[in-house]
Image: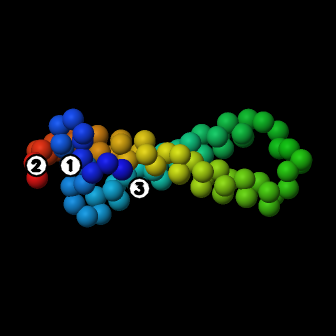
């Protein structure tokens, strides 16, 4: 994560714990993607090729990988939404 915008100098770290909102966005995006995949999979007949334990492991690994992949876009989204709702000024230091 960059500390500030390289063009205008806008700070990306407003206060300590600021990116808890980004973590919540990461969780929501990950849960949304997994829920969508789950709902699509309900349309297909249950396959007996994969055991229940492997299936649970596959979901867990998918959730872990997705949360890592989606963390940067989610943090960007959090920053954008927060700036859109309550813009803050550039502080030159
Ligand atoms: Zn900028």
Circle nearer the N terminus (2, 3):
3
Dot 1, crowdedness within 10 Å: few (<14), some or many (≥20)? some
x and y, in percent, of residue 76 in the image:
36, 42
Q: Could you tell me which secondary element the residue under label 3 belongs to? A: helix
Disc 1/disc 3 C-alpha distance (Å) = 19 Å
44 to the left or right of 89: right
Q: Which residue shows up at 60% across the image and 40% down it?
A: 36
Classed neighbour count for the residue bearing mark 2: other residues with Cα under 10 Å, few (<14), some (14–19), many (≥20): few
- Work out which residue is located at the far bottom of the displayed protein and give it: 16
- Are the residues flagged by discs 2 and 1 in contact, CB closer than 8 Å? yes
Whole-angstrom CA distance, mark 2 to mark 1, is 7 Å
Determine the secondary structure under disc 1.
Answer: loop
In the depicted view, which residue is nearer to us: 44 or 83?
83
Q: Which mark is residue 23?
A: 3
What is the x, y in percent for residue 83?
22, 42
Q: Position of residue 72 (x, y in %)?
A: 43, 45
Q: Can you see residue 85?
A: no
Q: Which residue is mark 2?
A: 91
Residue located at (21% from left, 55% from top): 14
Q: CA distance from mark 2 to mark 3?
A: 25 Å
Q: Which residue is mark 1?
A: 11
Q: Is residue 16 visible?
A: yes
Sequence-wise, the earlier of marks 1 and 3 is: 1
């Amino acid at each position: 994560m960059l500390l500030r915008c390289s063009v205008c100098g806008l700070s990306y770290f407003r206060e300590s714990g600021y990116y808890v909102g980004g973590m919540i966005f990461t969780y929501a995006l990950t849960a949304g993607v997994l829920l969508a995949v789950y709902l699509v999979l309900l349309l297909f007949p249950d396959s007996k090729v994969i055991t229940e334990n492997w299936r649970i492991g596959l979901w867990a690994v998918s959730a872990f990988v997705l949360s890592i992949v989606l963390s940067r876009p989610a943090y960007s989204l959090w920053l954008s939404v927060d700036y859109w709702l309550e813009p803050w000024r550039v502080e030159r230091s």
